Amino acid sequence: MKRSDKTPDDWAVLLEEFERRKAQAHTMGGPDKLAKRAASGRRNAREMIELLADPGSFMELGTLVGGHSYHGEPPVPADALVAGLATVDGRTVVVGCEDFTVGGGSIGHGTAAKRMRLARLAHQERCPLIMMLDGAGARATNALERHPYAPNDLQELAALSGLVPTVALVLGSSAGHGVLTGLLMDFVIALENATLFAAGPPLVQAALGEKVSKEELGAATMHARESGVVHNIVQDEEQACRLIRQYLAFLPANAWEYPPSRVEKKKDGERRLDEILQVVPCNGRQAYDMRKVLRLLADHGDFLEFQPLYGTPLLTGFLRLGGQPCAFVANQPAVLAGSITAEAAEKAAHFLHLANAFHLPVIFLTDNPGIMSGTKAEREGTLRAAARMYLAQAKLTSPKLHVTLRKAFGFGSSLMGMNPFDQQTITLAFPGISLGGLPAGGGGNAAKLDDERKARLAEAVASGAWSTGDTMAFDEIIDPRDLRNALLRGLALSLGRRTEAAAPVRISGIQP
C-alpha cells in the first residue's frame, strides 16, 4: 500500500497488515499452480468471475476467510472460494467460484459459512445466484476440527428454489457437497470435458471395489445425454458465460418481478411465416425438425434450447415473441415421431416448474402420436414421468398458449395443454389435424372393429380440425402462415394479468 503523509502512524501499520492479508488471499494456489492452470488453457477462479461479470463490477466478499492461523497452520487463501457481488448485463448477481488451485477447491468450515452466506444474500436481496464448481467436496481435514453447529448452504438453496434464478457451471471435476449445490439449482451447465459425481474414483474403489476413471464415472456429456443431471454442455469458458448471460436475459431478477420485455418495433412485430409450409409437411407421418419452426417463430430467429441432449423427442427452451420472453415446450417429430418418453416428460416437468416460477408464458407446439409405449417404456416408468409432466402443466399459473400443428393423440395431447377448460389463454390448430384417443389404424385394430367402422374412425380422426372448430374445442383454426401473428395476439391478451403484482408461485399437491 502506498503510504500517504497524512495517514496517521497507527492507521498506516494497521492498513499495511490489512493489505498484506488481502494480497495473500489473491495469491490463490501460488505461482506454480496458477501457471500450470494457465498452461492448460483454463482460467483461474478470479479470471472466471471477471469473464462473466461486467467490467469492474465485482466486489469480493469473504476475502480474508481462511487467512488467519490459530495453531500455526498455513493460510488457505479465500478458503478456496472466490465470491461476492457483481453485475451481469447491468443486473446485480451473487457469484462464487471454487478455486481448484487451493486445496483442490475443497470445502472447509470457512468455505461452508461463505457458501451459506451467498445463498442467504441471494434470498434476502432477491437477486440471481451463480456458482461455478471445480472442487473435491468436503475437505478431508474437516474431521480434525471442531464442527460448527450451523445451517448449511443446501438448506438455504432449498428455501431459495423458485424465488430467484440460480445457475451452476461445472468447470472441472465436482464431487460430493459441491455437486449437490449444483443439483439444487435451476440450470446446470458443464464444460464438455468436466466430470461430476457423488464420490470420486478413489472413494468408489474403496467402497465398491470398482476401479474407474473420472471420465468413466461421471463425464459431463454422459450426464447431459443419459442421466439428465446436466442441462446444457458448452465447449469452453467463453461460451459458458455467454450462455449464462443469455439465460438470465429471459428471466426476471426474482419471482416478485415479471420477465423483462425488449421490443424493437420494426423487427418484432407481426409478419406472415410463408416458409412454414415448406417446413411442416401436410402428411402427419412425415418427419420434420421442429427447431426450424421455432426459428421462424422467434424474434430474429433466435431461441435458447434448454437440455437439448436429453429427452430428445421433446424440445424445451426460451424465445422472444414481440419482444416478450416466453418458454416453449414442443414435440420433435424428427425423433420417435415426437412420442413423449420418460426422459422427455421428466425434462418438461422440471422446465415447466422453472417457467412457472418466473411467470413466463408457455407456448405448447403439439405434434405427437401420444406417450411412448412398449415394454421398454413401461419399465422406464413412462407413465409416472408423464403424470409428473401433466401435473406441472395443469398447475401452471402463467399464461398457456397451445397450438396443434398436425396430430395429438391420447394422453400426449393432455400433456401438451390441449384439453379444453385447461386455463389456456388461447388454443389454436392448423387445418388437417388428426385427433383422438388413439391413432386410427392402431385404435381400430385394438378395438377389433370391422372395416366399415375402421373407415369411419379414420374419417373422424382426419377431420379433427373441422369437428373441433365447430365445437370451439379450439379457439381458432388458423392458416399455418399466421402462427406468429396469432400467438402475438394471444400474448397481448395475456398481459392483462400483469395488472396484478408479481409474486412467488406456491404449488401444492403430491408429485406422482
Image: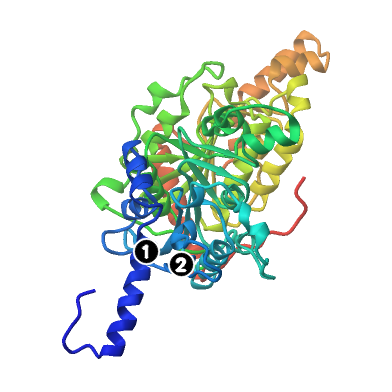
How packed is label 1: few (under 14 Cα within 10 Å), some, or many (20 or more)?
A: some
Q: Contact, CB < 8 Å: mark 1 with mark 2?
A: yes
Percent x, y of residue 116: 57, 65
**Is 317 situated left or right of 241 in this image?**
right
Between 217 and 310, the one lying in front of the other is 217
> Which residue is label 2 attached to?
67
Pick the quarter of the image with the N terminus: bottom left
How packed is label 2: few (under 14 Cα within 10 Å), some, or many (20 or more)?
A: some
**Is 39 situated left or right of 251 in this image?**
left
Looking at the image, which residue is at 55% across and 65% down? 110
Looking at the image, which residue is at 63% across and 64% down? 152
Q: Quadrant of residue 436?
A: top right
> Which residue is label 1 attached to?
24
Q: Quadrant of residue 380?
A: top right
Looking at the image, which residue is at 64% across and 47% down? 393
**Is 332 situated left or right of 5 in this image?**
right
Percent x, y of residue 6: 18, 89
